[in-house]
Image: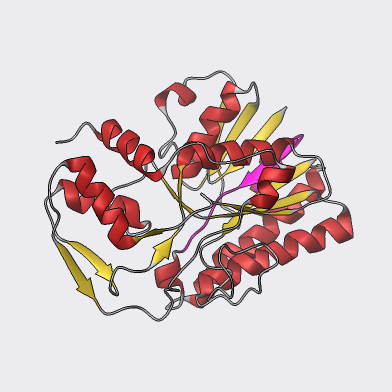
Amino acid sequence: MQAVVVGASGFIGSHLVDALLAEGYRVRAVARRLPGLISTHAQAHPNLSCHCVDLSDRLGLDQVLEQAHVVVHLASGSLPQSSNRHPHTDVSVNLLGSLNLLEASCQAGVQKLVVVSSGGTVYGFPKQVPIPEEHPTEPLCSYGITKLAIEKYVSLYRHLYGLDGVVLRVANPFGERQRLEATQGVVPVFLARALRSEPLEIWGDGSTVRDFLYISDVVAALLAACRYQGPEHLFNIGSGSGLSLRDLVTLLEELLGRSLEVRYRQGRSFDVPTNVLCIDKASRYLAWSPQVTVAQGLQRTRLSLCVD
């Protein structure tokens, strides 16, 4: 089986490359810049090839998708917190790029397309918790709107051309290789500041609840989606339970064995108070459920850093 991972140089993509190779796939890693976070073991693997291709390059996509069986789309050129300032860029890079990938996948006769969407932004203010896939979608940021539009195009291309596309609405992933200097993801941001003995900054009063999912569980869900043959095409992928930011700080204090300074800032308009995903559907159809708790995941992430 030939698998193509678009966005392979990133946090999730690099872990997925490892897992696909371990499962016996021949893998083409696609990204704008390589190798990025792809492991040295994967780079040396005979079944991996790397391709610097931008989603705007339709000819390049046609070439790299030739004879591909499975394509996993992880690439994104924007962040939720900055997307409202640059919605035109969000649309031109992410939405139009994804359309190029959909068209190239149809042209190549791809058997399965797995697209990672955002469980944290497409729903908006929750009317019920945990949030099921059928919940109304009212994104509060351009990032979520664009992700939702991509989902709709995946559905359209399935209807028009028979492209078997599956969408995973993934919660807040964290784990090894996540860039601590990045601005996306509260876990790496908090962990980086804690390790540098800097104060943690929380928007609001810390009662905000989020759904955190360790990277190995994210990858397991992606592999399950690649193998899935069935009638469903949309799945929430989360921990199934929520954790407040104050509780996350407590877990970090327990992990590091010391108190952490926290500074509270005025809440942001696009931050919903609670986001916890219902994962019953993924459990039923994908035979998937998370295996690693947040505390266990934080411990594994901390050990991988080898930093005191």
Q: Is residue 203 magenta?
A: no
Front residue of 261/50: it is 261
Which residue corresponds to the image point at 44% horizontal and 43% vertical from the top-left? 11
**Residue at the image point whose x is 60% and y is 29% from the top:** 20
The magenta span reads 61-78
How many numbered marks appear?
Answer: 0
Residue at image coords 25%, 55%? 249
Q: Is residue 71 magenta?
A: yes
Placement of 92 over or under 102, stated as above or below: below
Q: Would you say 298 lies left or right of 126 here?
A: left
Q: Nearer the viewer, residue 182 or 185?
A: 185
Confirm whether residue 177 shows in the render.
no
At 30% from the left and 32% from the top, the residue drawn is: 304
* Residue 96 image position (x, y, % from top left): 64, 65
Above or below, 99 relative to 138 = above
Residue 106 rendering spot, x and y as whole percentages = 80, 50
* Image quarter in which the N terminus is found: top right
Q: Is 117 displayed left or right of 263 in the figure?
A: right
Q: Is residue 199 left or right of residue 121?
A: left
Scheme of image coloration: secondary structure
Q: Report if residue 135 is visible in the image.
A: yes
Q: Position of residue 36 (x, y in %)?
A: 41, 40
Q: Quadrant of residue 28?
A: top right
